[in-house]
Image (cartoon, rainbow, N blue to C red):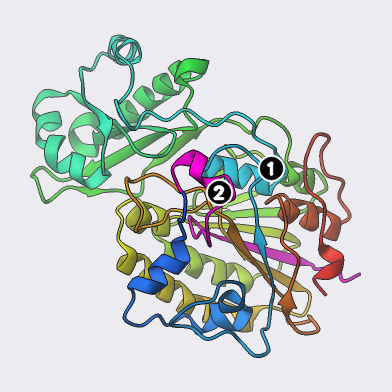
Amino acid sequence: MKKYTRVFVIVIDSLGIGAMPDAADYGDAETDTLGHIDERMDSFEIPNLARLGMANLHPLAHAAAAERPLGRYARLYEASVGKDTMTGHWEMMGLYITKPFKTFTDAGFPPELIEELEKRTGHRIVGNKAASGTAILDELGEHEIATGDMIVYTSADSVLQICGNEETFGLQELYRCCEIARELTMKDEWKVGRVIARPYVGRKKGKFKRTSNRHDYALKPYGRTALDALKASGLDVISVGKIRDIFDGEGITEACKSKSSVHGMEQTIEIADKDFHGMCFVNLVDFDALWGHRRDPVGYGQELERFDVKLGELLPKLKEDDLLIITADHGNDPTHTGTDHTRETVPFLAYSPSMNGGGALPDQHTFAVIGATIAENFGVAMPEGCIGEPILGILE
């Protein structure tokens, strides 16, 4: 059985490929993030994804299936309950989530939480609704600067987000308030997956700009994952993008923050030039945050085209003993109603220069095959209680 020295796992955040069998229970019947993007594009240039087998896995109007695909490909079904970023990533690394994270999209956070947060932080709270981060700054940024009030908002995700102007509110004060919010939202009835500090600069509507000093205060995974097992065995676990935040640093040996999805791919390409032994785990969040939630199928498609260009730069850097896995954590169909994630299957594309050709793999009924396969590759036992069976033997 082939053993790989380096494994790159790239998560195209929210790139679903069709509704799960239970999607109707989530209000997501007939969703299809990739398919509906393809339908809305006048042209759709993703030659490298197509070479790996994406158009074989999911027929597309604007990209032909490869006659001889380079990669092995399969459709992954989510075993856990929910359609959250953390749920999807945690399942990839072996955790089975039976209770979805709390969301407060429809009515904002309950008065009891807001009152306690105001009392503990010393700031009056404004906002308290689901909103785009840029839109709520245009609405309330000048007010926050003038009054010292604190902007709190949420989204379709399980998050509580707090905005703070770096010059007037102060970065350390913002972090302090977020730490208090994280403590308060550990209660079951208020438990969100992440509290996010959203610092910004600027003084006028239309001129506000969020900075790279964002900080996520995530829940720790409910148990040990494949990442913990790899790290405990002395292997490298390099995170790119928000992977470190999703796992609250657990099992990570080195973390790289990204400014955008393109930047995340540039960082991954740089990492491919380095010698390491273990895993590089990448999350590319712009697909979800900038295009899926904002229901912009053309913007999403163009982001995929930019990703494909960078994928074309990464592929030649892969060595014979490297393995690349491209997947997603949930769907976010930009043609669907509302702004929430969508309950979808996700792609699994696997490629190594040493593979004996590509082709279809059987559908897999949990994302956890990813962590289990990586652990088996490195001869590492998965932690007790983890789900997922390895498929390393059928990747060759």
Expressed as whole percent of the image width and height from the top left, the position of residue 159 reads 41, 33
For residue 388, above or below residue 279: above
| Numbered tag placed on residue 243 in the rendering | 2
Q: Quadrant of residue 299?
A: bottom left
For residue 247, above or below residue 51: above
Q: Quadrant of the N terminus?
A: bottom right
Q: Secondary structure at mark 1?
A: loop
**In this image, 282 relative to 333: left or right?**
right
Q: Residues within 10 Å of mark 1 (few under 14, many from 20)?
A: many
Check disc 1 and give the amino acid type. Gly
Expressed as whole percent of the image width and height from the top left, the position of residue 309 reads 46, 80
Q: Of 108 and 140, which appears nearest the observer?
A: 108
User: Within the magenta stretch, is there residue 104?
Assistant: no
Q: Residue furthest bottom?
A: 67
User: Does the rendering let one see residue 63?
Assistant: yes
> Residue at coordinates 38% horizontally, 39% vertically from top-left?
156
Count of numbered circles on the image:
2
Instruction: Label the magenta part by its dominant secondary structure.
Output: loop
Q: Residues within 10 Å of mark 2 (few under 14, many from 20)?
A: many
User: Does the rendering let one see residue 352?
Assistant: no
Per the image, the residue denoted by label 1 is 251
Disc 1/disc 2 C-alpha distance (Å): 11 Å
Tag 1 and tag 2, C-beta contact below 8 Å: no
Q: Quadrant of residue 58?
A: bottom right
Expressed as whole percent of the image width and height from the top left, the position of residue 49 reads 55, 77
> Residue at coordinates 59% horizontally, 49% vertically from top-left?
21
Q: Of 267 and 71, which appears nearest the observer?
A: 71
Q: Of 336 and 271, which appears nearest the observer?
A: 336
What are the residue bounds of the magenta stretch?
1-28
**In this image, 159 relative to 68: left or right?**
left
Q: Secondary structure at mark 2?
A: helix
**In this image, 347 relative to 375: left or right?**
left
